[in-house]
Amino acid sequence: MAKVIVQPGHDPRAIADLAGSARHGQMGFRQEDLELEVVDVTQAALDAALVDYTANQAARDAAFQVTVDAETVGSKQQEFNDDDVLRAAVDALREEINILRALHALPDISKGAMEGSVRNKIANP
């Protein structure tokens, strides 16, 4: 377990991530005294992460946001995979689209292609 005092405006989650923490449930942050405590990293790693973060805050915040965004997209895509009703609705729409495509001598859209398109739209709205 390691502890550091951060500055106002610092993102404690980004610092913990930079130190190599798994993030989920492995850190605590007390707003009143700006103390960041990370369970799954060494004091040396957290100290080095704080120095690096302070020196490069804009870049570190941007890099951490990319990580958060990727996790969010992955989570939303997994929600689609797990939602049987939504997947059934997408499949029903695909069948209707394929009927219209057949009227114009166009090939059917496969189930995999349709679901891939939905996942891509989740990632790139």
Image: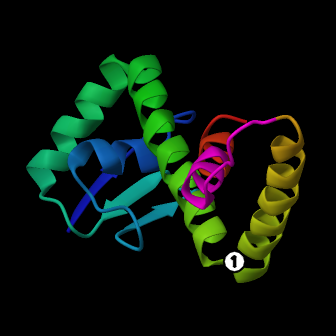
49 lies left or right of 17: left
Depth check, front residue: 27 or 106: 106
Depth check, front residue: 75 or 110: 110
Graded by Cα atoms within 10 Å as few (under 14), some (14 to 19) or many (20 or more), the crowding at tag 1 reads: few
Name, please, the residue furthest toward the bottom: 84
Q: Which residues are magenta?
A: 105-117
Query: Quick one: quadrant of the N terminus?
Result: bottom left
Determine which residue is flagged by label 1: 83
Query: Quick one: quadrant of the C terminus?
Result: top right
39 lies left or right of 82: left
Residue 2 picture location, percent across and down: 22, 61
Residue flagged by tag 1: what amino acid is it? Asp
Residue 15 picture location, percent across and down: 35, 43
Q: Is residue 12 visible?
A: no
Depth check, front residue: 109 or 38: 109
Residue 13 picture location, percent across and down: 44, 50
Residue 35 picture location, percent across and down: 42, 55
Q: Residue at x 62, y 56 (%)?
A: 115
